[in-house]
Amino acid sequence: MTHTHPEGFDYTIIRSSRRKSMALVIKQGEVIVRIPTTLAVKTAQDFVDKKRAWIKQKLEQLPVTRETVYADGESFLFLGNTYQLDIHTSSAENTIKHIDNRIQLYTKKKDISAEGIKRQLEKWYRQQANEILTSRFFQLAEAYQFFPKSLTIKTYKARWGSCYRSGDIQLNWKLIMATDKVIDYVILHELCHLRHHNHSKAFWQLVADICPTYKEHKLWLKQNGDRLTL
């Protein structure tokens, strides 16, 4: 549920049955308020209004991000590595290959637009995410004796994954841009929620037992999460 504050910034209110308190975060330039399902939306709106000066200050302090133009020679992340985009005109079907340190995009259109390149790139990234993240997910589930009901690769704006009490787990396809170790951490984090449906001390102890370096990967996501985008 997205709202526009009179001061000119947008903010999103997300309700969750797992939350016990309200939390305000600014992530990747987005203002997000997480609230329990029992809390009135008006309470969250009043809280944002109270914090409006702080929010505006934080938004103004955000670094200017590089504008993506989807041009030949531009760099993109894939599995934690930087790849240079090579655009080629081809009479064959539109396709993408990643060879050495390059993402080679073949298009039948000589004058393909930036939006067209973005669509082709995103389609390829999603395909890679479905194949690679799914394979790794079930490898780790089997290795650590977790029994998820299902896995879905989808788009999230402000989270990397989620686990439901039903056993259904979802992962953000943009994780395919992160390093292998960060991907493993996120997968293991969500798998651990199959045993602890919260962020209790017992949950974090289980994460630490399985992934002793999890704090390093959690910090990497906090510092670099805004780079995992097309």
Image: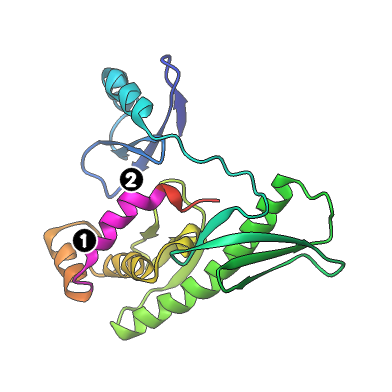
Question: Tag 2's secondary structure?
Answer: strand
> Where does residue 183 sit, x and y in percent of width and height?
38, 67
Q: With respect to residue 202, does 47 lie above or below?
A: above
The answer to which quarter of the image holds residue 11 is top left
- Mark nearest the camera among 1 and 2 is 1
Give the image quarter of residue 160.
bottom left
Amino acid carrying label 1: it is Lys
Q: Which mark is residue 215?
A: 1
Residue 223 magenta-highlighted: yes
Residue count near mark 2 (Cα–Cα under 10 Å), binned few <14, some 14–19, many ≥20: some
- Residue at 34% x, 29% y is 61
- Residue shown at 63% from the left, 44% from the top: 69
Residue at 39% across, 66% down: 179
Q: Distance from label 1 to label 2 (Cα)?
A: 24 Å
Q: Which residues are magenta?
A: 211-225
The reply to whether residue 143 is visible in this rendering is: yes
The extreme top residue here reads: 6
- Figure check: 30 above or below 80: above
Q: Earlier in the sequence, mark 1 or mark 2?
A: 2
> Residue 212, percent across and down?
18, 71
Residue 50, image quadrant: top left
Q: Position of residue 194 (x, y in %)?
A: 29, 69
**Dot 2 amino acid type:** Ser
Q: Which residue is mark 2?
A: 16
Residue 31 against residue 201 in the figure, above or below? above
Residue 163: x and y in percent read 36, 62
Label 1, secondary structure: give it. helix
Q: How is the image coloured?
A: rainbow
